[in-house]
Image (spheres, rainbow, N blue to C red):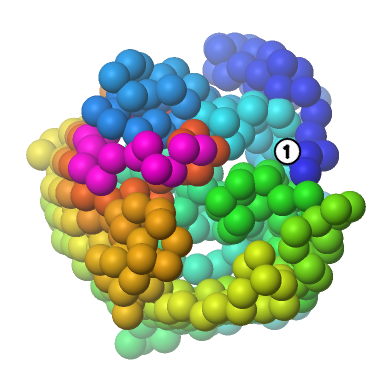
């Protein structure tokens, strides 16, 4: 399957051209636009090296520069209660993303209640999926806590499916003396036109096509003292059908993904502590003898600390754990049944990171991962599953510029 994208060279030229233009020149370029129109963008280039396996390109014992993000977003508010927002992105990430232009999100937002204590509205179009603390800001490097988000919660292997969907989103905010509440509920058609999603589901290409089914997501966030304490609960129900192709070894089947996420964060003056926990239920039904019906419940969690040494220098430490099946944490039952490596079913990742905000617009990052398991290793970069190694290290650096 191929995504409906514009050539990556066009995206790169347009977005990079805007990014390297000086601030006064950009102001002059957009001077004809009304004040109600806002245009911003970002450019990120990463380099990744791994001791074993490949991540975002041919990184094993080499340096992969195949990790690049260029985004341009715009919003227009013709009336106080009405706003149009959209973002286009060119992203390269190994064999999973080829840099072609896609629309990450694009929606119309109408606020039907807005006063000092309440804000309620409805978004329609391609809306960001609300779950966890970081999913709806994961596309901007400046807003992520690290180069790679905790992979046990925010899978890069299914980024398109996770990031946004086409449909409606109801949102609300309620501000109280005892804290603030933020609520979102989305009814969407999931984005399944990404070939990486198919390869991750089936561990390879399938002759048929994935078809979206109505899916639902919700999130409730509680914030106390201006965000010093943040608590969140998220629920997902993602539904995808499979339409067989010619001479297909799969029958017409259904894939169901249901998940619960619980998040907590404490922000002090110079440090922050964050943790998230997820239960993820997978169901495959009616695919035929090639993929018998099966159900499994995965478990994920991480704990992360950041410390601001200076206003521009920040350190990070994190421990991140993924189990594809909480009843088979070491993958031994999976290995016995399939002959595939047991380490494909888990991953434990210890991470150290450093961030330097050189200016308000330029950020540099470095990150080290020591990983046991390949549970979130991209299949598209490692098609030979039997050749992957259980213990591996990943080192990455990133430069990001926003305008």
Q: Where is residue 228 in the image (x, y as percent from the top left)?
A: 25, 68
Q: Which residue lies furthest to the right in this view?
A: 246
Q: Does the magenta stretch include residue 397?
A: yes
Q: Does the magenta stretch include residue 229?
A: no
Nearer to us in this view, 265 or 79: 265
Q: Residue furthest left?
A: 309
In the image, what residue occupies the spot 32% across and 80% down?
Answer: 327
- Rate crowding at label 1 as few (under 14), some (14 to 19) or many (20 or more) other CA atoms within 10 Å: many
**Above-or-below relation of 315 to 64:** below
In the image, what residue occupies the spot 50% across and 68% down?
Answer: 131
Nearer to us in this view, 355 or 153: 153
Which residue corresponds to mark 1?
Answer: 102
Query: In the image, 358: left or right of 199?
Result: left
Q: Position of residue 356 (x, y in %)?
A: 24, 29
Q: Can residue 399 be seen in this view?
A: no
- Using the rendered view, name the quadrant where residue 271 is placed: bottom left
- Using the rendered view, name the quadrant where residue 332 is placed: bottom left
Nearer to us in this view, 360 or 55: 55
Q: Can residue 298 be seen in this view?
A: yes
Query: In the image, 369: left or right of 32?
Result: left
The quadrant in which the N terminus is found is top right
Q: What element carries label 1?
A: strand
Q: Read off the magenta span.
A: 383-398
């Amino acid at each position: 399957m191929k995504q409906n994208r514009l050539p990556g060279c066009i995206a790169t030229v347009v977005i990079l051209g805007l990014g390297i233009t000086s601030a006064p020149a950009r102001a002059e370029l957009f001077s004809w636009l009304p004040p109600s129109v806002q245009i911003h963008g970002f450019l990120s280039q990463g380099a990744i090296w791994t001791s074993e396996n490949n991540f975002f390109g041919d990184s094993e014992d080499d340096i992969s520069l195949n990790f690049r993000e260029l985004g341009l977003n715009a919003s227009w508010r013709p009336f106080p209660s009405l706003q149009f927002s959209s973002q286009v992105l060119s992203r390269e990430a190994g064999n999973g993303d080829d840099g072609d232009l896609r629309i990450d999100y694009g929606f119309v937002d109408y606020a039907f209640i807005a006063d000092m204590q309440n804000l309620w509205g409805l978004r329609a179009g391609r809306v960001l999926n609300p779950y966890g603390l970081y999913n709806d800001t994961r596309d901007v490097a400046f807003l992520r806590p690290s180069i790679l988000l905790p992979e046990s919660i925010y899978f890069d292997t299914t980024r398109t499916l996770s990031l946004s969907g086409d449909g409606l989103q109801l949102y609300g905010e309620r501000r109280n003396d005892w804290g603030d509440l933020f609520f979102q509920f989305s009814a969407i058609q999931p984005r399944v036109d990404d070939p990486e999603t198919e390869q991750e589901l089936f561990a390879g290409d399938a002759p048929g096509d994935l078809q979206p089914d109505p899916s639902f997501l919700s999130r409730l966030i509680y914030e106390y003292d201006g965000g010093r304490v943040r608590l969140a609960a998220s629920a997902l129900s993602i539904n995808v059908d499979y339409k067989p192709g010619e001479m297909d070894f799969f029958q017409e089947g259904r894939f169901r993904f249901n998940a619960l996420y619980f998040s907590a964060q404490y922000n002090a003056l110079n440090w922050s502590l964050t943790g998230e926990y997820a239960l993820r239920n997978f169901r495959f039904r009616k695919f035929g003898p090639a993929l018998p019906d099966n159900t499994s419940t995965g478990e994920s969690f991480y704990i992360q600390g950041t410390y601001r040494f200076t206003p521009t220098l920040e350190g990070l430490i994190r421990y991140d754990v993924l189990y594809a099946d909480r009843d088979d944490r070491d993958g031994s039952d999976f290995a016995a049944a399939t002959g595939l490596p047991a380490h494909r079913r888990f991953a434990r990742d210890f991470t150290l990171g450093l961030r330097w905000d050189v200016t308000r617009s330029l950020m540099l990052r470095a990150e080290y991962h020591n990983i046991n398991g390949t549970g979130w290793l991209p299949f598209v970069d490692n098609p030979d599953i039997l050749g992957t190694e259980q213990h591996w290290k990943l080192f990455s650096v990133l430069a990001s510029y926003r305008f």
